Amino acid sequence: MRAALGLELADVSVRVGRAHAVRELTMSAPPAALTAVVGANGAGKSTVLRLLAGALRPDHGTLSFGGTDLSSLSRRARARLVALLEQQTTTDQDVTAAEVVALGRIPHLSAWSGPGADDRRIAHDALDRVGATHLAARSFGTLSGGEQQRVRLAASLAQEPKLLLVDEPTNHLDIGAQLDALALLRELADSGLTVLTALHDLGHALSHADHVVALDSGRTVAQGRPEDVLTPALIHRLYGVHAEVMTHPVTGVAAFAFSRLPVVTGQPEPVGVSGSLDRGRARHTS
């Protein structure tokens, strides 16, 4: 296995329309780790992913992955290095799951050749890796949301990326499918892939991520270990809610309870998450 590569964004700004979507953004994602990007709606989470994938170009700053300036790469070269799994999409075309996954091989094909035996093997292995081989011949449009998510993840893996970007992997999924999706991302990071995902659910970020980047109005306000970043004070700043850190009665790991109740003046802030969390246990409870 090749050494995993880390991600660094330095002083990045980009406008979408007349407004800055991100401004002077500096953040990192460690190699072979699962990094969660969190923040309220409009904080810039999806913009960061689109910048890294090449759908947007920065007005200023650098996007470096393993020492390579991503902005200097052609679309094809970047697609061989970075894969973006966007929020769930639908298609009117009658295609099988295997055909959807095969699309992930496009960055590796020449303009004059179709997929060969190696491409078919890689696509099959990607389906197997996400536990979806049995779906290969099924029409993609007939699959459940969770099954479609697995197939689309397999297509991203068929690109053979070194950096996997995932935008809201639990969006529109039922609870079981959410946990399955997060467990897959956790397994990919543990196997050596650098994974960066935008998450709404702070509990998921706390229990599954190695590293958290918190955004507010397009800027990084905190980054580091989940238990150090996701404090009640920061959550109140970003979301305007009161967060209580609790212990999950089954897994024994930290969990959040949220409310709109104000913090009583003069009372101590609820304690943050202990740095002694058994993160390995948290990863495998889903």
Image (cartoon, rainbow, N blue to C red):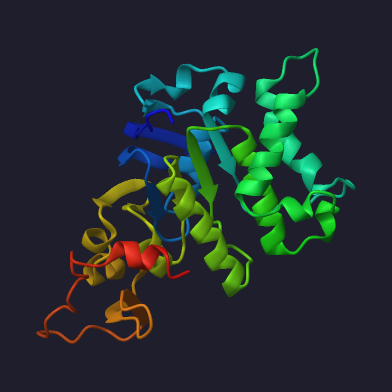
**Residue drawn at x 43%, y 27% as measured from the top left:** 59
Q: Does 122 sit above or below residue 73?
A: below
* 137 or 264: nearer the viewer: 137
Horizontal side, residue 273 vs residue 104: left or right: left
| Rendered image quadrant of residue 69 | top left
Res 16 visible:
no
Q: Does 74 sit above or below residue 86?
A: above
**Residue drawn at x 47%, y 52% as measured from the top left:** 187
Q: Position of residue 161 (x, y in %)?
A: 53, 32
Q: Position of residue 126 (x, y in %)?
A: 64, 42
Quadrant containing the N terminus in the rendered view: top left
* Most distant residue in the right direction: 94
**Residue drawn at x 46%, y 58% as measured from the top left:** 199
Q: How many marks?
A: 0
* 57 or 280: nearer the viewer: 280
* 281 or 79: nearer the viewer: 281
Horizontal side, residue 10 vs residue 63: left or right: left
Q: Position of residue 106 (x, y in %)?
A: 71, 26
Res 229 visible:
yes
**Residue drawn at x 70%, y 25% as measured from the top left:** 118
Q: Position of residue 174 (x, y in %)?
A: 62, 72
Q: Does 271 sit above or below residue 142?
A: below
